[in-house]
Amino acid sequence: MKKKEFKTESKKLMNLMINSIYTNKEIFLREIISNASDAIDKLHYLSLTDKDIKVNKKDFEIFLMIDKEKRTLTIRDNGIGMNKEELETNLGTIAKSGSEEFKTDNEHKKNIDIIGQFGVGFYSAFMVADKVEVISKKYGSDEAYKWESSGIDGYVITPAEKDRYGTDVILTIKEDNEEDYSKYLETYEIESLVRKYSDYITYPIKMEISHTHAKEKKNENDETEYETVTEVEVINSLTPIWKRDKKKVSDEDYDTFYSDKFNDYEKPLRHMHVKAEGTFEYNALLYIPSHAPFDYYTKEYEKGLQLYSNGVLIMEKCSDLLPDYFSFVKGVVDSPDLTLNISRETLQQNRILKTIANSIESKIKKELEIMLEEKREDYEKFFKDFGLQLKYGIYNDFGMHKDKLQDLLVYSSSFDGGITTLKEYVNRMKEDQKNIYYACGETIDKIQMLPQVESVKEKGYEVLYCTDQVDEFVFMMIRNYMDKEFVNVCGEKMDFDTEEEKEELKKANEDAKEMFDIMKTAIPEVEEIRFTNKLNDHPVCLSSKGEISVEMEKALSKMPMNNSIKASKVLEINQNHEIAKTLKKLSKKNKEELQDYAKVLYAEARMIEGLPVENATEIASLVCKFMTK
């Protein structure tokens, strides 16, 4: 029979697909198995609507066979099959979808699951095969036909012999060159691909598997002999755990699936089994891990959920299903409503994907809220590993997501030395308190030793301890929480004084202006020097003016291109401390020594703040000088 040519457009498309679109050759098996499943689905559905079609669902199967000598891999199904015209229509035109038409034309399409589509997906076989043969016999027909092609040149359809209805797809695997094609003739490789991509096809996928066993010894002196036994085995799991009734799935089942699927041998903190119905349908099984992967906060980490369509793996990590701030979540999503493009690797209907993603985001947020309320210990463990990601979620995108995430934040606090949420902090506030007070530092111990923190605590106010460099930026984005403003105890907005105390302090600073000017010539990097009355027994502290605090300067200095951003530093001196009297005396009789004192006091303030002292040798000499006077 004369070979028929593909249309010019089809030739170009096939060439593009084989060489460019599909970057992962191994998906060819997924495509063909999906087509086989569709063919069985069609016959099963028709048997439900046509009494003349008598088939038993228990008999449906997909069978895989390998012939290493002939270099063939055969995928056989006992589905509806195709006649000559359907072979011509479905396989003669690239991107022609018999399955798609079946779904479109049938008013009862919701009752069936059509996964694959003869068309471009089928032609992915040519990525690994020199020749593809399709031998098919339609249910109820006495005739069988063979469609045969070696690729772009065209195809031939001829009569064939076939015992029963269904379709055989026979791939003649390419010879090895730079690439190892022979692996597709190995049982373990095919079994692995089925488990990876088609594990949850609803029909059994069978294959002959050989196992080597030790023969039973007749007596202890006999040498061990081995025998190889070949058995037909079902190599797919059939029903995925996320499609099973929740009531029939134990916590152990969920944990085992998580461990096997995501190679994590620590139990997850929580799991979410979601079945969503409505405009769009999807099933999902989501997990909150108990610890962060070693590469979580690196560029190498890839977020995303495994995406399935009717049990067929479409994407290993679909990043569009998770916002960055929930990137720690692992799991699977399975939807029959996803329409796939020709490569089956990119989703066409982004609107559907976004709807699913929004739903998943809400589920995750709700689950975290429940854990925070009901399993506080678990939540604090979770936040220790992943809280930073939630903070980045607030800081990024100019605070766009703050309303979603701010109630999930927890901080160490001066209240009973425990962990608190922002809402809990506000609910404990004094009636006259207008601000949420916080302090930043490398560790809680260092923060607690800050003079400003001691002063605020002494007045009976609670202080949040912030040890992450992003914390201040987070509070800047939130701005107000329950009508309360965030105030850094080391910033210029700190003010507990009465009007009378303010006037008294203002006068003291005005009187000391000349003295401060002399001191400032010794430490020009300081924006201002002033007296304060908020330090109790401490002599000095370093605070800041404006939006950039000392801690923010530390954080920004570690970022590329931000080394020039500095905080406007203020050296505050306790006006009630003996050091203030000493400074006043020096300003009248020894201005040079006053400048030396200024250097030492500034160095002390920097050390308290955890900043480096750049002129350490000079400061050490000055300290010795004062000690030996």
Image: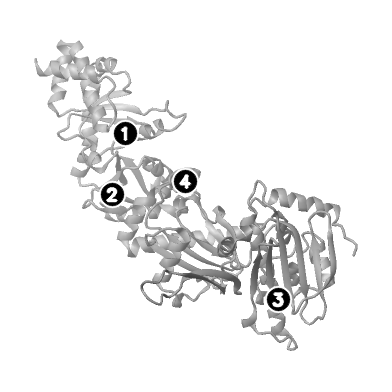
Q: Amino acid at mark 3?
A: Gly
Q: Nearer the viewer, mark 3 or mark 2?
A: 3
Q: Amino acid at mark 1?
A: Glu
- Quote the CA–CA distance across marks 1 and 2: 23 Å
Q: Is label 3 in contact with label 1 (beta carbons under 8 Å)?
A: no
Q: Is residue 112 above or below residue 269?
A: below
Q: Residue 492 — which label?
A: 1
Q: Mark 2 or mark 4: which comes first in sequence?
A: 4
Residue marked by disc 4: 399
Residue marked by disc 2: 412
**Which residue is located at x 43 percent, y 44 percent?**
477
Disc 3 residue crowd, few under 14, some 14–19, many 20+, Cα 10 Å: many
Q: Is residue 173 above or below residue 516?
A: below
Residue marked by disc 3: 79
**Which residue is located at x 77 percent, y 70 percent?**
135
Horizontal and vertical percent for residue 316? 55, 56
Q: For numbered disc 3, what is the local secondary structure?
A: loop
Q: For numbered disc 4, what is the local secondary structure?
A: helix
